[in-house]
Image (spheres, grey):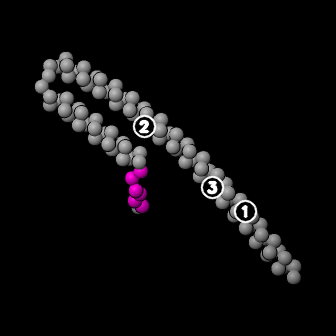
Amino acid sequence: MSEREPGAGDVFLSFLLGGMIGAVLGLLFAPCSGEELRRRLKKLSEEFKEDSEDIIREIKERTDEYMEENREKLFQKKKQIEAALEAGKRAYHKKRKD
């Protein structure tokens, strides 16, 4: 199984999740009324939703860019392999005729 280095998205996501967990724990252990706690949790969940949507949008954009870059590279490699196979076939047939 290959291990990969964590990317910027992984680090950012870890940071975001750690911050959200810390914020929720801070709210739960802070002395306040139930109504105040619910209001804070609602605000926190809305912020988390917005941040999550931003992260998902960024991941989709990066994935699309990555796929497009690699699709072109794959197409170029395919052309190279086809050209090499064709040259090999020509050389084989030429050698057989001689």
Q: Quadrant of the C terminus?
A: bottom right
Residue 58 spot, x, y in % from top left: 47, 38
Nearest the eye: 31 or 97: 31
Looking at the image, residue 93 lies above or below residue 8? below
Give how far apart the Cα atoms at labels 1 and 2 are: 40 Å
The amino acid type, in three-letter code, at marker 2 is Ile
Outermost residue on the left side: it is 31
Kindly identify which residue carries mark 2: 55
Q: Is residue 6 left or right of residue 65?
A: left
The amino acid type, in three-letter code, at marker 1 is Glu
To which quarter of the image does residue 97 belong? bottom right
Kindly identify which residue carries mark 1: 82
To which quarter of the image does residue 82 belong? bottom right
| SS class, disc 3 | helix
Kindly identify which residue carries mark 3: 73
Residue 62 spot, x, y in % from top left: 51, 43
Residue 16 spot, x, y in % from top left: 33, 39
- Report the residue at 29% width, 27% height from top: 44
**Is disc 2 surrounded by few (<14), some (14 to 19) or many (20+) residues within 10 Å?**
some
**Reading the chain from its start, which is encountered first: label 3 or label 2?**
2
For the stretch drawn in magenta, the main secondary structure is: loop
**Is disc 1 surrounded by few (<14), some (14 to 19) or many (20+) residues within 10 Å?**
few
The amino acid type, in three-letter code, at marker 3 is Lys
**Reading the chain from its start, which is encountered first: label 1 or label 2?**
2
- Report the residue at 77% width, 69% height from top: 87
Q: Single out the mark in the foreground, 1 or 2.
A: 2
Q: Which label is found at residue 46?
A: none
Give the extent of the magenta segment: 2-7
| SS class, disc 1 | helix
Give how far apart the Cα atoms at labels 3 and 1 are: 14 Å
